[in-house]
Amino acid sequence: QLQLVESGGGLVQPGGSLRLSCAASGFNLDSYDIGWHRQAPGSERARGVSCIIVGSKNTYYSGSVKGRFTISRDNAKNTVYLQMNNLNPDDTGIYYCAAYDNAMRACPGFKHALSPPGYDYRGQGTQVTVSS
Protein backbone atom coordinates (compact mmCIF):
# COMPACT_ATOMS: atom_id res chain seq x y z
CA GLN A 1 0.00 0.00 0.00
CA LEU A 2 1.40 3.38 -1.03
CA GLN A 3 0.94 5.93 1.71
CA LEU A 4 2.35 8.75 3.79
CA VAL A 5 1.75 8.85 7.52
CA GLU A 6 2.44 11.88 9.68
CA SER A 7 3.08 11.76 13.41
CA GLY A 8 4.51 13.88 16.19
CA GLY A 9 1.81 16.48 16.61
CA GLY A 10 0.35 17.50 19.94
CA LEU A 11 -0.34 20.30 22.36
CA VAL A 12 2.61 22.52 23.23
CA GLN A 13 3.03 25.83 25.03
CA PRO A 14 4.28 28.92 23.20
CA GLY A 15 8.04 28.76 22.89
CA GLY A 16 8.03 24.98 22.88
CA SER A 17 9.17 22.51 20.23
CA LEU A 18 7.82 19.55 18.31
CA ARG A 19 9.25 17.26 15.66
CA LEU A 20 6.88 16.01 13.01
CA SER A 21 7.58 12.88 11.00
CA CYS A 22 6.38 11.96 7.53
CA ALA A 23 6.95 8.25 6.92
CA ALA A 24 6.42 6.60 3.56
CA SER A 25 5.47 3.02 2.84
CA GLY A 26 5.38 1.34 -0.53
CA PHE A 27 7.63 3.84 -2.28
CA ASN A 28 10.98 5.58 -1.92
CA LEU A 29 10.53 8.99 -0.35
CA ASP A 30 13.92 10.16 -1.58
CA SER A 31 12.64 10.03 -5.14
CA TYR A 32 10.28 12.93 -4.42
CA ASP A 33 10.29 16.52 -3.32
CA ILE A 34 8.48 16.60 0.03
CA GLY A 35 6.45 19.53 1.24
CA TRP A 36 4.88 20.24 4.60
CA HIS A 37 1.58 22.12 4.58
CA ARG A 38 -0.48 23.65 7.38
CA GLN A 39 -4.22 24.11 7.45
CA ALA A 40 -5.12 26.59 10.16
CA PRO A 41 -8.39 26.34 12.10
CA GLY A 42 -11.28 27.82 10.13
CA SER A 43 -9.17 28.23 7.01
CA GLU A 44 -10.38 26.73 3.78
CA ARG A 45 -6.94 26.63 2.28
CA ALA A 46 -3.68 25.13 3.42
CA ARG A 47 -0.45 27.12 3.37
CA GLY A 48 2.96 25.85 2.44
CA VAL A 49 5.39 25.66 5.34
CA SER A 50 8.55 23.96 4.13
CA CYS A 51 9.83 21.79 1.30
CA ILE A 52 12.89 19.68 0.59
CA ILE A 53 14.19 18.79 -2.85
CA VAL A 54 15.15 15.27 -3.96
CA GLY A 55 18.56 14.43 -2.55
CA SER A 56 18.20 17.19 0.07
CA LYS A 57 20.09 19.62 -2.15
CA ASN A 58 17.80 22.52 -1.36
CA THR A 59 15.28 23.40 1.32
CA TYR A 60 12.61 26.07 1.35
CA TYR A 61 10.69 27.80 4.14
CA SER A 62 7.83 30.23 4.31
CA GLY A 63 8.73 33.57 5.84
CA SER A 64 6.80 32.95 9.04
CA VAL A 65 8.76 29.81 9.96
CA LYS A 66 12.20 30.53 8.54
CA GLY A 67 14.79 30.36 11.28
CA ARG A 68 12.49 28.36 13.56
CA PHE A 69 11.68 25.24 11.53
CA THR A 70 14.08 22.77 9.94
CA ILE A 71 13.18 20.15 7.35
CA SER A 72 15.35 17.08 6.86
CA ARG A 73 15.39 13.54 5.49
CA ASP A 74 16.47 10.20 6.88
CA ASN A 75 16.64 7.96 3.84
CA ALA A 76 17.42 4.89 5.91
CA LYS A 77 14.07 5.34 7.66
CA ASN A 78 12.29 6.57 4.53
CA THR A 79 11.11 9.54 6.58
CA VAL A 80 11.11 13.32 6.34
CA TYR A 81 11.11 15.41 9.50
CA LEU A 82 10.00 18.90 10.39
CA GLN A 83 11.68 20.20 13.52
CA MET A 84 9.63 23.09 14.87
CA ASN A 85 11.14 25.36 17.52
CA ASN A 86 9.94 28.46 19.29
CA LEU A 87 6.35 27.68 18.39
CA ASN A 88 3.67 30.33 18.64
CA PRO A 89 -0.15 30.17 18.46
CA ASP A 90 -0.10 31.11 14.75
CA ASP A 91 1.60 27.76 14.08
CA THR A 92 -1.55 25.93 15.18
CA GLY A 93 -3.15 23.73 12.56
CA ILE A 94 -3.21 20.38 10.86
CA TYR A 95 0.15 19.62 9.29
CA TYR A 96 0.33 17.23 6.42
CA CYS A 97 3.12 16.17 4.07
CA ALA A 98 2.88 15.67 0.35
CA ALA A 99 5.19 14.03 -2.20
CA TYR A 100 5.78 15.82 -5.50
CA ASP A 101 7.47 14.64 -8.65
CA ASN A 102 10.62 16.76 -8.92
CA ALA A 103 9.53 17.83 -12.40
CA MET A 104 6.63 19.76 -10.82
CA ARG A 105 9.11 22.23 -9.32
CA ALA A 106 6.73 22.69 -6.41
CA CYS A 107 9.26 23.52 -3.70
CA PRO A 108 10.13 27.14 -4.58
CA GLY A 109 6.51 28.12 -4.02
CA PHE A 110 6.82 27.22 -0.35
CA LYS A 111 8.96 30.32 0.18
CA HIS A 112 5.80 32.29 -0.46
CA ALA A 113 3.63 29.97 1.67
CA LEU A 114 2.00 28.54 -1.43
CA SER A 115 0.44 25.11 -1.18
CA PRO A 116 0.91 23.68 -4.66
CA PRO A 117 -1.49 21.01 -5.90
CA GLY A 118 -0.36 18.21 -8.16
CA TYR A 119 1.28 16.01 -5.54
CA ASP A 120 1.43 12.28 -6.08
CA TYR A 121 0.79 11.36 -2.44
CA ARG A 122 -0.28 13.10 0.73
CA GLY A 123 -0.90 12.03 4.29
CA GLN A 124 -3.91 12.55 6.51
CA GLY A 125 -2.19 15.05 8.74
CA THR A 126 -1.27 15.52 12.37
CA GLN A 127 -2.71 18.17 14.68
CA VAL A 128 -0.43 20.79 16.21
CA THR A 129 -1.88 23.07 18.87
CA VAL A 130 0.17 25.86 20.40
CA SER A 131 -1.55 27.27 23.44
CA SER A 132 -0.87 28.22 27.03
Image (cartoon, rainbow, N blue to C red):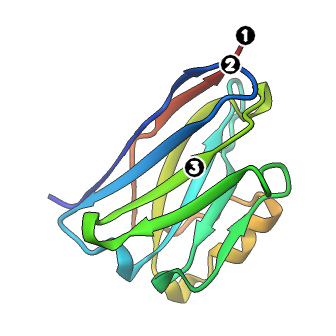
Q: Tell me the quadrant of the picture where the N terminus can be found.
A: bottom left
Q: Residue furthest top?
A: 132
According to the image, label 3 marks what residue?
83
In this view, 77 is above or below 125: below
Residue drawn at point x = 79 percent, y = 57 percent: 66
Q: Position of residue 6 (x, y in %)?
A: 39, 44
Question: Would you say 117 lies left or right of 110 here?
Answer: left
Question: Would you say 13 lies left or right of 57 here?
Answer: right
According to the image, label 2 marks what residue?
13
| Sooner in the amino-acid sequence: mark 2 or mark 3 | 2
According to the image, label 1 marks what residue?
132
Give the structural element (helix, strand or loop) at label 1: loop
Question: Is the residue marked by circle 3 packed among few (<14), some (14-19), or many (20+) residues within 10 Å?
Answer: some
User: Picture quarter containing residue 130?
Assistant: top right
Separation (CA) of disc 3 from disc 1: 20 Å
Give the structural element (helix, strand or loop) at label 2: loop
Q: Which mark is residue 7?
A: none
Front residue of 120 and 102: 102
Q: Position of residue 44 (x, y in %)?
A: 68, 36
- Is there CB contact under 8 Å for labels 2 and 1? yes
In this view, 73 is above or below 123: below
In this view, 72 is above or below 59: above
Q: Position of residue 73 (x, y in %)?
A: 44, 68
Q: Position of residue 99 (x, y in %)?
A: 44, 67
Question: Would you say 131 lies left or right of 112 here?
Answer: left
| Sooner in the amino-acid sequence: mark 2 or mark 1 | 2
In this view, 39 is above or below 61: above
Separation (CA) of disc 2 from disc 1: 5 Å
